[in-house]
Image (cartoon, coloured by chain):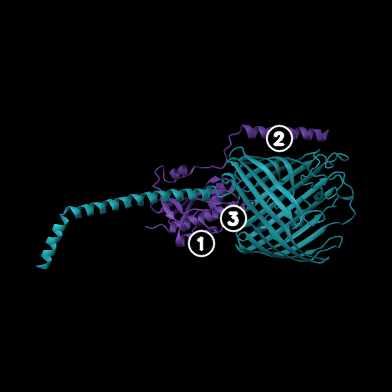
Chain colours: A cyan, B purple
């Protein structure tokens, strides 16, 4: 009886205009909320699209987000006989790049060596790269400016994460001589899949007052440019893990107009093979410096480096290096230098490396530096 | 005379390079448009785009795979039957590499580099390299179950493409039926 009365009362109330108005108002509120929700979802979608676009395409800095910043560095500790016990922040490098358009870009590498630069200080500030690159088509690029010479294994790719041992190998350092940059123009292109060429016309060495090729680098610092250098490289990478490359290089007058005209030519060849955990690198380089006295007319060297990675975080290596900056027949006898290295690289992060290695030297002049080296390095 | 001759050669070559720069259609880097890749995979009838949120646990795992936080909050994908297609970006050294990756039944069916923007390392786009990814699956450590041999001088590009392959395999496991 009570239930029936309530239902009758409810029916009565619903039929009143007041309640009907309340229901209409409620429905309008729901519709408004639905519209607001739809609008918010649309705005959320648009915000995410914008954030994603910023994150993926414009992650750089500067004007229009097209300027990128990177770098690498390495701190070394050497404990070697011959009284070389030193600690040195060997390299602090910043990369700055800028994309002017999809097909034209700038790249630079600015390096502070040995922590402090200036008059009487051990270090120096060097511009190692600074060039504009143009894409000519899908397989060909041109660049102009100051750039690394396309030669050897470590000359163009020398971030500490990418090579074994605290110090770069002595053969490329003293014979190639890495790190080596000049100014000029270059072409790079593909002949077929995995077969590429580089052709560079640049400033060259100046050996008018020096004998060792390493000492002939003028680093594009008000360097004499009487005689340019021509460099050509062929590189084969069509088998994953394998790189075979050879570079030929010529300067018609290595005195740069300061003496008797004589040519210097260099041939370099290397093979890098990495398959699974196993790696093997071998390099040979030889300079023919016509007219140089006391054996400096031939400067030559080679190394071989097997390595093994137990995991992506840890790898071991051994390297045998032999080189001679006075290998010509008119030299003062045996002047060769030999060095054997063994060591371990540990990568706690893919962009951070810790290295420990031992070296023994067997130099003809008996000035050997034996002992161990340690390093911590990074790239970003 | 020898120096003069070399100077002439150099002048000629630089002029040639500048002429090539001026006259060439500047177009390197885009090897296939993403929509063409999808049409190719789905025989001109691609399914509707789907979006996966990269949040919560998924974001944590993606961060572990990439070794940095993802730049996107959502990822687009296309799915038909057991196949899913992912078009993903990852920075090599400085610029993003865009790859199309087809996953079928938990294994990689195909990897294709669609857009390459770096100045070095574009050898990774070639079939001789990407075919190594075929039939790779993800192991419990979120690594590919077989090793990928790199390309000397293209280390960072190889690393980026390997990460994208692992990412596509992982994300395909997160698709809700």
Examine the rendering and report whether any part of residue A64 can be seen: yes
Please tell me in which quadrant of the rendered image residue B53 appears: bottom left
Residue appearing at x 63%, y 39% in the figure? A134
Which corner quadrant holds the N terminus of chain A?
bottom left
How busy is the neighbourhood of tag 3: few (under 14 within 10 Å), some, or many (20 plus)? some
Whole-number angstrom distance, CA of label 2 to CA of label 1: 49 Å
Mark 2 or mark 1: whose residue is earlier in sequence: 2
Q: Nearer the viewer, residue A80 or A54?
A: A54
Chain letter for the residue marked with disc 1 in the picture: B
Q: Are marks 1 and 3 on the same chain?
A: yes
How busy is the neighbourhood of tag 1: few (under 14 within 10 Å), some, or many (20 plus)? some
A261 displayed left or right of A249: right
Q: For residue A365, which numbered disc appears in the image?
A: none
Q: Position of residue A35 (x, y in %)?
A: 33, 49
| Mark 3 lies on residue | B149
Whole-number angstrom distance, CA of label 2 to CA of label 3: 37 Å
Whole-number angstrom distance, CA of label 1 to CA of label 3: 18 Å
Q: Position of residue B5 (x, y in %)?
A: 79, 33
Mark 2 or mark 3: whose residue is earlier in sequence: 2
2 and 1 marks in contact (CB < 8 Å): no
Tag in front: 2 or 1 = 2
Mark 1 or mark 3: whose residue is earlier in sequence: 1
Residue appearing at x 64%, y 51% in the figure? B153
2 and 3 marks in contact (CB < 8 Å): no
Q: Position of residue B104 (x, y in %)?
A: 44, 54
The kind of secondary structure element at disc 1 is loop
Q: For residue B142, which numbered disc appears in the image?
A: 1
Chain letter for the residue marked with disc 3 in the picture: B
| Mark 2 lies on residue | B14
A78 displayed left or right of B38: right
């Amino acid at each position: 009886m009570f239930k029936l009365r309530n239902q009758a009362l409810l029916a009565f109330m619903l039929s009143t205009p007041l309640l009907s108005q309340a229901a209409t108002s409620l429905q309008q509120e729901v519709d408004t909320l639905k519209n607001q929700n739809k609008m918010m979802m649309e705005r959320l979608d648009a915000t995410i699209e914008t954030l994603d676009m910023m994150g993926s395409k414009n992650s750089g800095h500067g004007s229009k987000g097209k300027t990128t910043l990177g770098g690498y560095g390495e701190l070394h500790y050497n404990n070697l006989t011959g009284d070389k016990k030193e600690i040195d922040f060997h390299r602090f490098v910043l990369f700055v790049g800028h994309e002017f358009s999809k097909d034209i870009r700038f790249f630079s590498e600015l390096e502070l060596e040995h922590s402090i630069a200036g008059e009487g200080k051990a270090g120096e500030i060097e511009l190692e790269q600074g060039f504009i690159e143009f894409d000519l088509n899908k397989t060909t690029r041109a660049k102009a400016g100051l750039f690394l010479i396309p030669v050897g294994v470590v000359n163009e790719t020398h971030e500490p994460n990418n090579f074994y041992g605290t110090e770069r190998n002595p053969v490329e350092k003293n014979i190639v001589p890495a790190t080596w940059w000049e100014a000029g123009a270059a072409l790079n292109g593909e002949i077929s899949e995995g077969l590429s060429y580089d052709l560079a016309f640049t400033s060259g060495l100046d050996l008018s007052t020096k004998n060792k090729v390493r000492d002939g680098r003028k680093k594009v610092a008000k360097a004499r440019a009487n005689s340019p250098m021509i460099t050509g490289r062929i590189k084969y990478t069509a088998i994953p893990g394998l790189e075979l490359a050879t570079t030929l290089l010529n300067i018609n007058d290595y005195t740069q107009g300061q003496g008797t005209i004589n040519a210097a030519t260099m041939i370099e060849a290397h093979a890098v093979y990495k398959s699974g955990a196993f790696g093997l690198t071998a390099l040979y380089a030889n300079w023919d410096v016509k007219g140089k006295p006391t054996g400096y007319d031939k400067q030559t060297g080679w190394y071989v480096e097997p390595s093994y990675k137990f995991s992506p975080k840890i790898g071991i290596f051994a390297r045998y290096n032999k080189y001679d900056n006075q290998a010509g027949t008119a030299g003062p006898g045996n002047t060769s230098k030999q060095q054997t290295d063994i060591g371990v690289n540990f990568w706690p992060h893919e962009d951070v490396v810790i290295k420990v290695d031992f070296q023994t030297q067997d130099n003809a002049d008996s000035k050997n530096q034996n002992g161990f080296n340690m390093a911590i390095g990074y790239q970003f | 005379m020898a120096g003069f001759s070399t100077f002439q050669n150099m002048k000629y070559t630089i002029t040639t390079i500048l002429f090539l720069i001026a006259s060439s259609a500047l177009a390197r880097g885009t090897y296939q448009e993403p929509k063409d890749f999808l049409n190719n995979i789905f025989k001109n009838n691609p399914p509707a785009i789907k979006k996966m949120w990269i949040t919560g646990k998924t974001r944590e795992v993606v961060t572990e795979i990439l070794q940095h936080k993802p730049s996107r909050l959502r990822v687009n994908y296309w799915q038909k039957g057991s196949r899913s297609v992912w078009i993903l970006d990852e920075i090599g050294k400085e610029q993003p590499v865009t790859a199309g990756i087809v996953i079928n039944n938990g294994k990689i069916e195909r990897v294709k580099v669609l857009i390459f923007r770096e100045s070095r390392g574009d050898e990774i786009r070639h079939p001789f390299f990407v075919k190594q990814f075929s039939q790779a699956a993800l192991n419990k450590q979120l690594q590919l179950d077989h090793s990928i041999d790199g390309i000397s001088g293209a280390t960072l590009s190889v690393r980026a493409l390997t990460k994208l392959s692992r990412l596509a395999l992982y994300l395909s496991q997160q698709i809700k039926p």
